[in-house]
Image: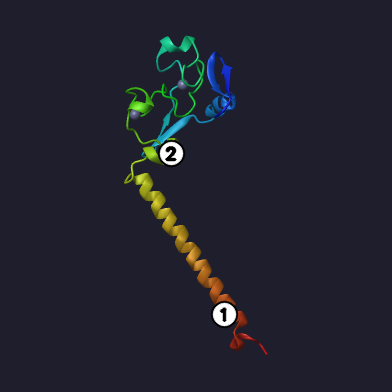
Amino acid sequence: MAELVRHRGVSVTADWPARIAGAQELTHYSSRGVRHPRIRYGDDDPRWGEVPCRDCAAIKGEFHVPDCEDEHCPVCQAGPLQSCECPLDELGLSRREPDSPAGGLIGKRAVLILLGVLVLFAVGCLWFLIRWLPWGQPT
Ligand SMILES: [Zn+2]
Ligand SMILES: [Zn+2]
């Protein structure tokens, strides 16, 4: 069980202030190959901006920590991320559509890498055979 500290009046784990700082680096979410600027705390609903986010302790003008249940979805803008089904690359595989174009691209890339490794392996084997088989020796 992680130790909890009070940060801006919200109970968070000891590493949380660093996670809030890290969350500020993530300025966009990608969905179906399109980048969407994240919605800052306070821009989603001005009424909430006066106190730190009750879930992730972000303050007005900061980004929520990813997976915060109060962060609004920048794709559909219909409400909190947790209640919509938009696939966002940054939030992990669980939210990604299995047959999305992005997923297909990753699959294709994996096949290409595998092929590359196989070709390298074959070339290595050939080199080994030519180098070490008796008929390959210059003697
Ligand atoms: Zn939050
Ligand atoms: Zn959404």
Question: Which of the 4 quarters of the picture holds residue 97?
Answer: top left
Please count the marks in the image: 2
| Quarter of the image where ligand 2 sits | top left
Whole-number angstrom distance, CA of label 2 to CA of label 1: 45 Å
Q: Residues within 10 Å of mark 1 (few under 14, many from 20)?
A: few
> Residue shown at 51%/71% (left/top)?
122
In terms of secondary structure, where does tag 2 sit?
Answer: loop
Report the amino acid beneath label 2: Gly
Q: Measured from the top left, where is residue 88 in percent x and y? A: 39, 35
Give whichever of 7, 131 is nearer the camera: 7
Name the residue furthest right: 139
Q: Which residue lies at the image location 46% right of the left edge and 31% below the top edge?
A: 28
Residue 31 location, quadrant: top left
Q: Nearer the viewer, mark 2 or mark 1?
A: 2
56 sits left or right of 138 in the view = left
- 137 vs 100: above or below: below
Outermost front residue:
1
Considering only vertical position in the picture, is 114 above or below 27? below
Query: Percent from the top left, x then y, of residue 57?
Result: 51, 19
The front one of 53 and 139 is 53
Estimate the x, y position of residue 112 in percent, counting from the top left.
Answer: 44, 59
Q: Which residue is mark 1?
A: 129
Q: Which residue is mark 2?
A: 92
Which coloring applies here?
rainbow
Where residue 18 sits in the image (x, y, percent)?
59, 27
Residue at the location (45% across, 63% down)? 115
As helix, strand or loop, the secondary structure at mark 1 comes to helix
What residue is shown at x 34% (from left), y 24% (from top)? 77
- Considering only order in the chain, which callout, 1 or 2, is on the residue closer to the N terminus? 2
The answer to whether the residues at label 2 and label 1 have Cβ atoms under 8 Å apart is: no
Amino acid type, mark 1: Leu
